[in-house]
Image (cartoon, rainbow, N blue to C red):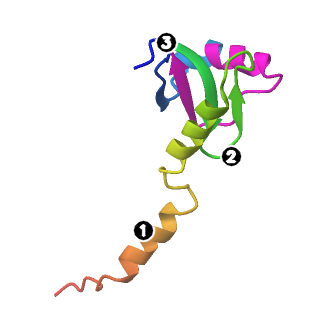
Amino acid sequence: MNSTASSISIRRARQDDNASLWRVASLDSALVPAEPLLVAESGREVVAALSIASGEAIADPFRRSAEVVELLRLRASQFPRASERPRRLLARLRGRPALVAQ
């Protein structure tokens, strides 16, 4: 195993990530994307973030972050979109017989 390889952790952003998100956004000459956000950390430092809602990403341009953003996109694709949730619920409810009081 390569000793120079760093591990990446992906998780949902928390309230205490605000300063780190603004730092990365300013390095990327961007604004912090809309919540909810996923963040990628390397060595307990946020290096990239991705909006689950819009797909917009920010990343530290002074690091090799293209692969990190792709990991964030892959992880975000595993979350159901807000627009898909009601349809699935309605489809499940439509397939059930109505309850009749007797």
Q: For residue 64, which quarter of the picture?
A: top right
In the image, 65 versus 79, the foreground residue is 65
Few, some or many residues within 10 Å of mark 1 (<14, 14–19, 20+): few
Q: CA distance from mark 3 to mark 2?
A: 25 Å
User: Are the two marked residues, 2 and 1, in contact with CB atoms closer than 8 angstroms?
Assistant: no
Q: Give the percent coordinates (x, y) of residue 59.
A: 69, 25
- Residue at position x 55%, y 28% in the image: 39
Q: Residue furthest right?
A: 29
In the image, 94 versus 70, the foreground residue is 70
- Residue at position x 68%, y 18% in the image: 63
Q: Is residue 19 magenta?
A: no
In the displayed structure, 99 sits above or below 72; it is below
Between discs 2 and 1, the one toward the N terminus: 2
The residue to which callout 1 is attached is 89
- Residue at position x 25%, y 82% in the image: 99
Q: Give the quadrant of the N terminus.
A: top left
Q: Which mark is residue 54?
A: 2
Between discs 3 and 2, the one toward the N terminus: 3
Few, some or many residues within 10 Å of mark 3 (<14, 14–19, 20+): few
Q: Give the quadrant of the C terminus.
A: bottom left
Amino acid at pointer 2:
Ser
Q: CA distance from mark 3 to mark 1?
A: 38 Å
Q: For residue 93, which quarter of the picture?
A: bottom left
Amino acid at pointer 1:
Leu
Q: What segment is highlighted magenta in the picture?
A: 20-44
Per the image, label 3 sits on a secondary structure element best described as: loop
Q: Which mark is residue 44?
A: 3
Amino acid at pointer 3:
Arg
- Mark 3 or 2: in front is 3
Per the image, label 2 sits on a secondary structure element best described as: loop
Q: Which mark is residue 42?
A: none
- Mark 3 or 1: in front is 3
